[in-house]
Image (tube, coloured by chain):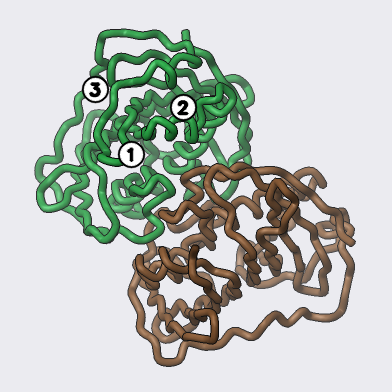
Chain colours: A brown, B green
Amino acid sequence: MGKRYTTSYEIAYYDCDINGTMTMPSMLAVVIRASEEQSDGLDRGAAFVSSFGLGWVITNYEIHIKRLPKVGEKVDITTEAIAYNKYFCYRHFWIHDQEGNECVLIKSTFVLIDKKNRKMSSVLPEIIEPYASEKITKIYRGEKIEKVGSGTFLPYRVRFFDIDGNQHVNNSIYFNWLLDVLGYDFLTHHEPTFINIKFDKEVEYGQEIESHYEVKEQENEKKTLHEIQIAGQTYCEANMKWRKRK
Amino acid sequence: MGKRYTTSYEIAYYDCDINGTMTMPSMLAVVIRASEEQSDGLDRGAAFVSSFGLGWVITNYEIHIKRLPKVGEKVDITTEAIAYNKYFCYRHFWIHDQEGNECVLIKSTFVLIDKKNRKMSSVLPEIIEPYASEKITKIYRGEKIEKVGSGTFLPYRVRFFDIDGNQHVNNSIYFNWLLDVLGYDFLTHHEPTFINIKFDKEVEYGQEIESHYEVKEQENEKKTLHEIQIAGQTYCEANMKWRKRK
Protein backbone atom coordinates (compact mmCIF):
# COMPACT_ATOMS: atom_id res chain seq x y z
CA MET A 1 0.00 0.00 0.00
CA GLY A 2 2.79 2.40 0.87
CA LYS A 3 5.47 3.34 -1.64
CA ARG A 4 8.10 0.67 -2.17
CA TYR A 5 11.80 1.26 -2.65
CA THR A 6 14.32 -1.35 -3.84
CA THR A 7 18.09 -1.19 -4.00
CA SER A 8 20.76 -3.86 -4.47
CA TYR A 9 23.71 -4.73 -2.27
CA GLU A 10 26.72 -7.03 -2.47
CA ILE A 11 27.67 -8.65 0.82
CA ALA A 12 31.29 -7.94 1.84
CA TYR A 13 33.46 -10.11 4.11
CA TYR A 14 33.16 -7.51 6.85
CA ASP A 15 29.38 -7.93 6.77
CA CYS A 16 29.87 -11.57 7.75
CA ASP A 17 30.92 -13.52 10.78
CA ILE A 18 33.21 -16.53 10.90
CA ASN A 19 30.49 -18.66 9.24
CA GLY A 20 30.65 -16.53 6.08
CA THR A 21 27.01 -15.49 6.49
CA MET A 22 25.69 -12.00 7.06
CA THR A 23 25.51 -10.80 10.67
CA MET A 24 22.35 -9.27 12.13
CA PRO A 25 24.00 -5.85 12.69
CA SER A 26 25.17 -5.69 9.05
CA MET A 27 21.77 -6.81 7.81
CA LEU A 28 20.01 -4.12 9.84
CA ALA A 29 22.50 -1.43 8.79
CA VAL A 30 21.90 -2.29 5.14
CA VAL A 31 18.10 -2.32 5.36
CA ILE A 32 18.02 0.89 7.40
CA ARG A 33 20.21 2.53 4.77
CA ALA A 34 17.61 1.53 2.16
CA SER A 35 14.84 3.22 4.16
CA GLU A 36 17.01 6.34 4.49
CA GLU A 37 17.53 6.40 0.74
CA GLN A 38 13.77 6.19 0.29
CA SER A 39 13.26 9.01 2.81
CA ASP A 40 15.87 11.20 1.10
CA GLY A 41 14.17 10.61 -2.24
CA LEU A 42 10.87 11.78 -0.70
CA ASP A 43 12.57 14.83 0.91
CA ARG A 44 11.91 13.34 4.33
CA GLY A 45 15.52 12.73 5.34
CA ALA A 46 16.98 13.07 8.84
CA ALA A 47 17.47 16.85 8.42
CA PHE A 48 13.77 17.37 7.63
CA VAL A 49 12.66 15.27 10.61
CA SER A 50 15.18 17.07 12.78
CA SER A 51 13.72 20.44 11.75
CA PHE A 52 10.71 19.51 13.96
CA GLY A 53 13.09 18.67 16.82
CA LEU A 54 12.33 14.99 16.22
CA GLY A 55 14.22 11.84 15.33
CA TRP A 56 13.28 8.27 14.42
CA VAL A 57 13.86 5.47 16.94
CA ILE A 58 13.24 1.78 16.32
CA THR A 59 11.45 0.00 19.15
CA ASN A 60 11.00 -3.50 17.72
CA TYR A 61 12.24 -5.88 15.01
CA GLU A 62 10.57 -9.15 14.12
CA ILE A 63 12.97 -10.95 11.80
CA HIS A 64 11.93 -14.01 9.77
CA ILE A 65 14.93 -15.75 8.20
CA LYS A 66 14.57 -18.39 5.50
CA ARG A 67 18.24 -18.23 4.56
CA LEU A 68 21.09 -15.96 5.67
CA PRO A 69 22.77 -14.12 2.75
CA LYS A 70 26.37 -15.21 2.13
CA VAL A 71 29.65 -13.37 1.57
CA GLY A 72 30.01 -12.19 -2.05
CA GLU A 73 26.29 -12.65 -2.76
CA LYS A 74 24.26 -9.91 -4.42
CA VAL A 75 20.84 -9.27 -2.90
CA ASP A 76 17.92 -6.91 -3.41
CA ILE A 77 16.68 -4.89 -0.46
CA THR A 78 13.07 -3.73 -0.59
CA THR A 79 11.32 -1.56 1.95
CA GLU A 80 7.79 -0.26 2.40
CA ALA A 81 6.15 1.92 5.03
CA ILE A 82 3.12 -0.30 5.65
CA ALA A 83 0.91 1.60 8.05
CA TYR A 84 0.91 4.00 10.98
CA ASN A 85 -1.31 4.98 13.88
CA LYS A 86 -1.09 7.87 16.34
CA TYR A 87 2.33 6.90 17.71
CA PHE A 88 3.71 3.91 15.80
CA CYS A 89 4.94 3.52 12.22
CA TYR A 90 5.22 0.02 10.76
CA ARG A 91 7.80 -0.65 8.06
CA HIS A 92 8.70 -3.92 6.36
CA PHE A 93 11.98 -4.90 4.73
CA TRP A 94 12.64 -7.83 2.41
CA ILE A 95 15.92 -9.31 1.27
CA HIS A 96 15.68 -11.33 -1.96
CA ASP A 97 18.42 -13.30 -3.70
CA GLN A 98 19.19 -13.03 -7.42
CA GLU A 99 16.70 -15.81 -8.22
CA GLY A 100 13.98 -13.76 -6.56
CA ASN A 101 13.66 -15.99 -3.49
CA GLU A 102 12.85 -14.27 -0.22
CA CYS A 103 15.74 -14.74 2.21
CA VAL A 104 14.63 -12.44 5.02
CA LEU A 105 11.53 -10.49 6.05
CA ILE A 106 11.93 -7.86 8.75
CA LYS A 107 8.91 -6.21 10.36
CA SER A 108 9.91 -3.07 12.23
CA THR A 109 8.24 -0.49 14.44
CA PHE A 110 9.45 3.11 14.40
CA VAL A 111 8.51 5.96 16.71
CA LEU A 112 9.32 9.66 16.59
CA ILE A 113 10.96 11.05 19.68
CA ASP A 114 11.63 14.58 20.80
CA LYS A 115 15.40 14.98 20.55
CA LYS A 116 15.58 17.17 23.66
CA ASN A 117 13.61 15.21 26.25
CA ARG A 118 13.73 11.79 24.46
CA LYS A 119 9.92 11.49 24.85
CA MET A 120 7.68 9.96 22.22
CA SER A 121 5.91 12.36 19.84
CA SER A 122 2.72 11.66 17.89
CA VAL A 123 3.30 11.00 14.19
CA LEU A 124 3.26 14.28 12.21
CA PRO A 125 1.33 14.28 8.90
CA GLU A 126 4.05 16.49 7.33
CA ILE A 127 6.58 13.75 7.95
CA ILE A 128 4.58 10.65 7.10
CA GLU A 129 2.41 11.81 4.18
CA PRO A 130 4.78 11.23 1.19
CA TYR A 131 5.22 7.52 2.03
CA ALA A 132 1.54 6.90 1.18
CA SER A 133 1.20 4.37 3.99
CA GLU A 134 -2.18 3.54 5.46
CA LYS A 135 -3.42 5.35 8.55
CA ILE A 136 -4.87 2.85 11.00
CA THR A 137 -6.22 3.06 14.52
CA LYS A 138 -5.14 -0.41 15.54
CA ILE A 139 -1.87 -1.06 17.37
CA TYR A 140 -0.06 -4.12 16.07
CA ARG A 141 0.85 -6.51 18.85
CA GLY A 142 3.75 -8.65 17.78
CA GLU A 143 4.47 -12.12 19.15
CA LYS A 144 4.86 -11.93 22.92
CA ILE A 145 8.42 -12.09 24.25
CA GLU A 146 9.02 -14.95 26.68
CA LYS A 147 11.11 -13.83 29.67
CA VAL A 148 14.43 -15.37 30.70
CA GLY A 149 13.70 -17.79 33.53
CA SER A 150 16.68 -19.53 35.04
CA GLY A 151 19.57 -18.27 33.01
CA THR A 152 23.02 -16.85 33.48
CA PHE A 153 24.70 -13.66 32.21
CA LEU A 154 27.91 -11.96 31.09
CA PRO A 155 28.72 -8.30 31.81
CA TYR A 156 29.63 -5.79 29.06
CA ARG A 157 30.91 -2.24 29.46
CA VAL A 158 29.53 0.40 27.08
CA ARG A 159 32.50 1.61 25.01
CA PHE A 160 32.96 5.01 23.35
CA PHE A 161 32.35 3.69 19.85
CA ASP A 162 29.17 1.88 20.91
CA ILE A 163 27.49 5.31 20.84
CA ASP A 164 26.63 6.48 17.32
CA GLY A 165 25.83 9.83 15.66
CA ASN A 166 22.30 9.60 17.13
CA GLN A 167 23.92 9.93 20.58
CA HIS A 168 22.82 6.54 21.87
CA VAL A 169 24.01 2.96 21.76
CA ASN A 170 23.68 1.69 18.20
CA ASN A 171 21.18 -1.16 17.80
CA SER A 172 23.93 -3.35 16.36
CA ILE A 173 25.70 -3.29 19.73
CA TYR A 174 22.66 -4.81 21.45
CA PHE A 175 22.87 -7.74 19.03
CA ASN A 176 26.56 -8.10 19.81
CA TRP A 177 25.80 -8.29 23.56
CA LEU A 178 22.78 -10.58 23.11
CA LEU A 179 24.53 -13.09 20.84
CA ASP A 180 28.13 -13.11 22.13
CA VAL A 181 27.02 -14.86 25.34
CA LEU A 182 25.92 -17.91 23.32
CA GLY A 183 29.58 -18.66 22.58
CA TYR A 184 31.64 -19.96 19.69
CA ASP A 185 30.28 -23.52 19.61
CA PHE A 186 26.64 -22.52 19.58
CA LEU A 187 27.14 -19.74 17.02
CA THR A 188 29.12 -21.87 14.58
CA HIS A 189 26.66 -24.81 14.76
CA HIS A 190 23.35 -22.92 14.64
CA GLU A 191 21.74 -20.21 12.56
CA PRO A 192 18.76 -18.07 13.49
CA THR A 193 15.39 -18.59 11.79
CA PHE A 194 13.43 -16.05 13.85
CA ILE A 195 14.33 -13.10 16.05
CA ASN A 196 11.94 -10.91 17.99
CA ILE A 197 13.67 -8.02 19.72
CA LYS A 198 12.26 -5.13 21.72
CA PHE A 199 14.22 -2.05 22.74
CA ASP A 200 12.77 -0.73 26.00
CA LYS A 201 15.22 1.83 27.37
CA GLU A 202 18.31 3.60 26.08
CA VAL A 203 21.63 2.48 27.50
CA GLU A 204 24.20 5.24 28.07
CA TYR A 205 27.97 5.60 27.80
CA GLY A 206 29.94 4.27 30.74
CA GLN A 207 27.17 1.98 32.01
CA GLU A 208 27.83 -1.72 32.48
CA ILE A 209 25.09 -3.99 31.21
CA GLU A 210 24.30 -7.64 31.95
CA SER A 211 23.40 -9.85 29.01
CA HIS A 212 21.13 -12.54 30.48
CA TYR A 213 20.18 -15.61 28.48
CA GLU A 214 18.59 -19.04 28.59
CA VAL A 215 18.75 -21.81 25.97
CA LYS A 216 15.62 -23.99 25.58
CA GLU A 217 15.36 -27.20 23.56
CA GLN A 218 12.17 -27.61 21.55
CA GLU A 219 11.23 -30.42 19.14
CA ASN A 220 13.42 -29.73 16.11
CA GLU A 221 14.81 -26.40 17.13
CA LYS A 222 16.42 -24.43 19.90
CA LYS A 223 14.92 -21.30 21.37
CA THR A 224 16.99 -18.71 23.21
CA LEU A 225 15.60 -16.09 25.57
CA HIS A 226 17.51 -12.85 26.16
CA GLU A 227 17.43 -9.78 28.34
CA ILE A 228 19.78 -6.80 28.71
CA GLN A 229 19.60 -5.56 32.30
CA ILE A 230 21.12 -2.79 34.35
CA ALA A 231 20.49 -2.99 38.09
CA GLY A 232 17.57 -5.34 37.58
CA GLN A 233 15.84 -3.10 35.02
CA THR A 234 15.08 -4.35 31.50
CA TYR A 235 16.66 -2.35 28.66
CA CYS A 236 16.18 -4.81 25.82
CA GLU A 237 14.58 -8.24 25.46
CA ALA A 238 14.59 -10.84 22.71
CA ASN A 239 13.54 -14.33 21.72
CA MET A 240 15.30 -16.26 18.98
CA LYS A 241 14.75 -19.57 17.22
CA TRP A 242 17.64 -21.55 15.76
CA ARG A 243 18.24 -24.52 13.49
CA LYS A 244 21.43 -26.51 12.91
CA ARG A 245 23.79 -25.04 10.33
CA LYS A 246 24.48 -27.30 7.37
CA MET B 1 50.05 5.60 -12.71
CA GLY B 2 47.73 2.76 -11.77
CA LYS B 3 44.06 2.72 -12.72
CA ARG B 4 41.87 4.95 -10.60
CA TYR B 5 38.38 4.19 -9.40
CA THR B 6 35.96 6.69 -7.86
CA THR B 7 32.61 6.16 -6.19
CA SER B 8 30.44 8.36 -4.00
CA TYR B 9 29.11 7.76 -0.52
CA GLU B 10 26.71 9.49 1.87
CA ILE B 11 27.71 9.30 5.52
CA ALA B 12 25.03 7.76 7.74
CA TYR B 13 24.56 8.34 11.48
CA TYR B 14 25.83 4.84 12.19
CA ASP B 15 29.11 5.74 10.44
CA CYS B 16 29.64 8.44 13.06
CA ASP B 17 30.49 8.65 16.72
CA ILE B 18 28.97 10.95 19.31
CA ASN B 19 30.76 13.93 17.70
CA GLY B 20 28.79 13.46 14.48
CA THR B 21 31.99 12.84 12.49
CA MET B 22 32.94 9.65 10.67
CA THR B 23 34.72 6.99 12.73
CA MET B 24 37.96 5.38 11.54
CA PRO B 25 36.36 1.90 11.23
CA SER B 26 33.54 3.26 9.04
CA MET B 27 36.01 5.25 6.96
CA LEU B 28 38.17 2.19 6.37
CA ALA B 29 35.16 -0.04 5.60
CA VAL B 30 33.99 2.46 2.99
CA VAL B 31 37.37 2.88 1.28
CA ILE B 32 38.04 -0.88 1.27
CA ARG B 33 34.64 -1.39 -0.33
CA ALA B 34 35.72 1.02 -3.11
CA SER B 35 38.86 -1.04 -3.75
CA GLU B 36 36.76 -4.21 -3.85
CA GLU B 37 34.44 -2.62 -6.39
CA GLN B 38 37.49 -1.74 -8.49
CA SER B 39 38.81 -5.31 -8.16
CA ASP B 40 35.43 -6.80 -9.13
CA GLY B 41 35.34 -4.53 -12.18
CA LEU B 42 38.77 -5.84 -13.22
CA ASP B 43 37.72 -9.47 -12.56
CA ARG B 44 40.15 -9.65 -9.67
CA GLY B 45 37.63 -10.04 -6.86
CA ALA B 46 38.05 -12.11 -3.70
CA ALA B 47 36.93 -15.32 -5.48
CA PHE B 48 39.66 -14.94 -8.14
CA VAL B 49 42.36 -14.31 -5.53
CA SER B 50 41.03 -17.21 -3.49
CA SER B 51 41.35 -19.53 -6.53
CA PHE B 52 45.14 -19.32 -5.94
CA GLY B 53 44.62 -20.18 -2.26
CA LEU B 54 45.44 -16.57 -1.40
CA GLY B 55 43.80 -13.63 0.32
CA TRP B 56 44.62 -9.94 0.80
CA VAL B 57 45.74 -8.72 4.21
CA ILE B 58 46.44 -5.08 5.13
CA THR B 59 49.62 -4.57 7.15
CA ASN B 60 49.75 -0.78 7.45
CA TYR B 61 47.65 2.37 7.15
CA GLU B 62 49.06 5.89 7.15
CA ILE B 63 46.08 8.22 7.44
CA HIS B 64 46.36 11.98 6.81
CA ILE B 65 43.25 13.83 7.91
CA LYS B 66 42.56 17.43 6.94
CA ARG B 67 38.91 17.25 8.00
CA LEU B 68 36.71 14.38 9.17
CA PRO B 69 33.61 13.86 7.01
CA LYS B 70 30.34 14.66 8.81
CA VAL B 71 27.01 12.87 9.21
CA GLY B 72 24.77 13.43 6.15
CA GLU B 73 27.67 14.65 4.00
CA LYS B 74 28.25 13.24 0.50
CA VAL B 75 31.85 12.42 -0.34
CA ASP B 76 33.81 10.95 -3.24
CA ILE B 77 36.05 7.98 -2.56
CA THR B 78 38.95 7.49 -4.98
CA THR B 79 41.43 4.64 -4.95
CA GLU B 80 44.52 3.76 -6.95
CA ALA B 81 46.95 0.84 -6.79
CA ILE B 82 50.12 2.92 -6.83
CA ALA B 83 53.00 0.43 -7.02
CA TYR B 84 54.14 -3.02 -5.93
CA ASN B 85 57.35 -4.93 -5.34
CA LYS B 86 57.99 -8.61 -4.73
CA TYR B 87 55.84 -8.81 -1.57
CA PHE B 88 54.11 -5.49 -0.96
CA CYS B 89 51.32 -3.69 -2.82
CA TYR B 90 50.80 0.01 -2.16
CA ARG B 91 47.35 1.51 -2.56
CA HIS B 92 46.16 5.07 -1.91
CA PHE B 93 42.67 6.23 -1.04
CA TRP B 94 41.34 9.76 -1.08
CA ILE B 95 38.14 11.18 0.35
CA HIS B 96 37.01 14.45 -1.23
CA ASP B 97 34.07 16.64 -0.29
CA GLN B 98 31.54 18.01 -2.79
CA GLU B 99 33.64 21.13 -3.33
CA GLY B 100 36.53 18.91 -4.40
CA ASN B 101 38.60 19.52 -1.26
CA GLU B 102 40.70 16.62 -0.02
CA CYS B 103 39.45 15.57 3.43
CA VAL B 104 41.50 12.41 3.93
CA LEU B 105 44.43 10.62 2.26
CA ILE B 106 45.07 7.01 3.27
CA LYS B 107 48.24 5.21 2.21
CA SER B 108 47.91 1.48 2.66
CA THR B 109 50.11 -1.59 2.31
CA PHE B 110 48.58 -4.91 1.23
CA VAL B 111 50.17 -8.36 1.16
CA LEU B 112 48.92 -11.65 -0.20
CA ILE B 113 48.85 -14.50 2.27
CA ASP B 114 48.37 -18.21 1.82
CA LYS B 115 44.96 -18.94 3.34
CA LYS B 116 46.06 -22.30 4.76
CA ASN B 117 49.29 -21.49 6.57
CA ARG B 118 48.74 -17.67 6.85
CA LYS B 119 52.25 -17.08 5.42
CA MET B 120 53.07 -14.25 3.02
CA SER B 121 53.11 -15.06 -0.69
CA SER B 122 54.99 -13.15 -3.40
CA VAL B 123 52.75 -10.97 -5.57
CA LEU B 124 51.36 -12.94 -8.52
CA PRO B 125 51.38 -11.19 -11.92
CA GLU B 126 47.98 -12.76 -12.76
CA ILE B 127 46.47 -10.98 -9.79
CA ILE B 128 48.19 -7.60 -10.01
CA GLU B 129 48.45 -6.98 -13.75
CA PRO B 130 45.00 -5.44 -14.55
CA TYR B 131 45.52 -2.62 -12.01
CA ALA B 132 48.36 -1.20 -14.19
CA SER B 133 50.35 -0.19 -11.12
CA GLU B 134 54.10 0.30 -11.35
CA LYS B 135 56.47 -2.54 -10.48
CA ILE B 136 59.25 -1.26 -8.25
CA THR B 137 62.15 -2.90 -6.41
CA LYS B 138 62.15 -0.42 -3.54
CA ILE B 139 60.33 -1.12 -0.28
CA TYR B 140 58.52 1.94 1.08
CA ARG B 141 59.41 2.67 4.66
CA GLY B 142 56.67 4.67 6.29
CA GLU B 143 57.18 6.98 9.23
CA LYS B 144 58.70 5.04 12.12
CA ILE B 145 56.31 4.14 14.94
CA GLU B 146 57.37 5.47 18.34
CA LYS B 147 56.88 2.86 21.09
CA VAL B 148 54.73 3.32 24.18
CA GLY B 149 57.08 4.26 27.01
CA SER B 150 55.50 4.71 30.41
CA GLY B 151 51.84 4.15 29.78
CA THR B 152 48.92 2.24 31.17
CA PHE B 153 46.43 -0.20 29.60
CA LEU B 154 42.91 -1.61 29.59
CA PRO B 155 42.08 -5.28 28.84
CA TYR B 156 39.61 -6.34 26.12
CA ARG B 157 38.26 -9.81 25.43
CA VAL B 158 37.91 -10.88 21.76
CA ARG B 159 34.17 -11.39 21.13
CA PHE B 160 32.53 -13.68 18.58
CA PHE B 161 31.50 -10.83 16.28
CA ASP B 162 35.00 -9.31 16.33
CA ILE B 163 35.97 -12.08 13.88
CA ASP B 164 34.84 -11.40 10.31
CA GLY B 165 34.29 -13.46 7.17
CA ASN B 166 38.07 -13.47 6.63
CA GLN B 167 38.32 -15.56 9.82
CA HIS B 168 40.34 -13.03 11.79
CA VAL B 169 39.72 -9.99 13.93
CA ASN B 170 38.41 -7.21 11.71
CA ASN B 171 40.74 -4.19 11.49
CA SER B 172 37.95 -1.98 12.76
CA ILE B 173 38.07 -3.78 16.11
CA TYR B 174 41.73 -2.84 16.60
CA PHE B 175 40.71 0.82 16.23
CA ASN B 176 37.99 0.30 18.79
CA TRP B 177 40.49 -1.14 21.30
CA LEU B 178 43.18 1.47 20.51
CA LEU B 179 40.88 4.47 20.82
CA ASP B 180 38.42 3.45 23.57
CA VAL B 181 41.19 3.68 26.20
CA LEU B 182 41.53 7.44 25.55
CA GLY B 183 38.12 7.96 27.14
CA TYR B 184 35.09 10.17 26.62
CA ASP B 185 36.68 13.51 27.51
CA PHE B 186 39.67 13.10 25.23
CA LEU B 187 37.61 11.77 22.32
CA THR B 188 34.98 14.50 22.46
CA HIS B 189 37.56 17.32 22.71
CA HIS B 190 40.11 16.14 20.13
CA GLU B 191 40.11 14.91 16.55
CA PRO B 192 42.87 12.98 14.80
CA THR B 193 44.99 14.63 12.09
CA PHE B 194 47.38 11.73 11.49
CA ILE B 195 47.29 7.99 12.25
CA ASN B 196 50.03 5.51 11.49
CA ILE B 197 49.01 1.94 12.33
CA LYS B 198 50.85 -1.32 11.78
CA PHE B 199 49.24 -4.76 12.12
CA ASP B 200 51.95 -7.22 13.22
CA LYS B 201 50.20 -10.42 14.27
CA GLU B 202 46.68 -11.78 14.03
CA VAL B 203 44.64 -11.88 17.25
CA GLU B 204 42.36 -14.90 17.65
CA TYR B 205 38.93 -15.58 19.17
CA GLY B 206 38.89 -16.00 22.93
CA GLN B 207 42.18 -14.21 23.55
CA GLU B 208 42.32 -11.26 25.91
CA ILE B 209 44.35 -8.33 24.64
CA GLU B 210 45.86 -5.35 26.47
CA SER B 211 45.47 -1.94 24.85
CA HIS B 212 48.50 0.05 26.05
CA TYR B 213 48.74 3.79 25.49
CA GLU B 214 50.60 6.96 26.34
CA VAL B 215 49.54 10.58 25.73
CA LYS B 216 52.32 13.08 24.90
CA GLU B 217 51.95 16.85 24.74
CA GLN B 218 53.77 18.55 21.87
CA GLU B 219 53.73 22.25 20.93
CA ASN B 220 50.26 22.73 19.42
CA GLU B 221 49.15 19.15 19.34
CA LYS B 222 48.88 15.93 21.28
CA LYS B 223 50.48 12.72 20.22
CA THR B 224 49.28 9.33 21.42
CA LEU B 225 51.29 6.13 21.28
CA HIS B 226 49.51 2.76 21.21
CA GLU B 227 50.27 -0.93 21.37
CA ILE B 228 48.05 -4.02 21.45
CA GLN B 229 49.79 -6.73 23.46
CA ILE B 230 49.14 -10.31 24.48
CA ALA B 231 51.56 -11.75 27.03
CA GLY B 232 54.15 -9.06 26.28
CA GLN B 233 54.07 -9.64 22.50
CA THR B 234 53.15 -6.85 20.08
CA TYR B 235 50.13 -7.52 17.85
CA CYS B 236 49.46 -3.99 16.62
CA GLU B 237 51.09 -0.60 17.13
CA ALA B 238 50.08 2.93 16.28
CA ASN B 239 50.95 6.61 16.62
CA MET B 240 48.32 9.31 16.32
CA LYS B 241 48.37 13.12 16.25
CA TRP B 242 45.43 15.15 17.51
CA ARG B 243 44.14 18.71 17.47
CA LYS B 244 41.40 20.35 19.51
CA ARG B 245 37.91 19.92 18.11
CA LYS B 246 36.18 23.19 17.29
Whichever of callouts 3 and 1 sits on the residue coming sooner in the sequence is 1
Dot 1 surroundings within 10 Å: few (below 14), some, or many (20 or more)? some
Quadrant of the image occupied by residue B222: top left
Q: Which residue is mark 1?
A: B115
Name the kind of residue labelled 1 in the image.
Lys
Q: Is residue A8 above or below residue A127?
A: above
Can you tell which quarter of the image residue A140 is in? bottom right
- The Cα atoms of the two marked residues, 1 and 2, are separated by 32 Å
The quadrant holding residue A189 is bottom left
Mark 2: few, some, or many residues within 10 Å (few <14, many ≥20)?
A: many
Q: Write the residue at 46% across / 24% down.
A: B93
Tell me the quarter of the image containing the N terminus of chain A.
Answer: bottom right
Mark 2 lies on a secondary structure that is: strand
Check disc 3 and give the amino acid type: Glu
Position of residue A101 relative to residue A91, above or below, is above
A139 is higher (above) or lower (below) than A119 = below
Q: Between residues B182 and A27, which one lies in front from this camera angle?
A: A27
Residue linked to disc 2: B104
Residue type, label 2: Val
Front-most of residues A10 and B234? A10
Nearest the viewer among A210 and B234 is B234
- Asked whether residue A97 is in view, the answer is yes
Chain at numbered mark 3: B
Label 3, label 2: how far apart the Cα atoms are: 17 Å
Q: Give the x, y percent position of residue A202.
A: 52, 70
- Residue B28 relative to residue B208: left or right: right
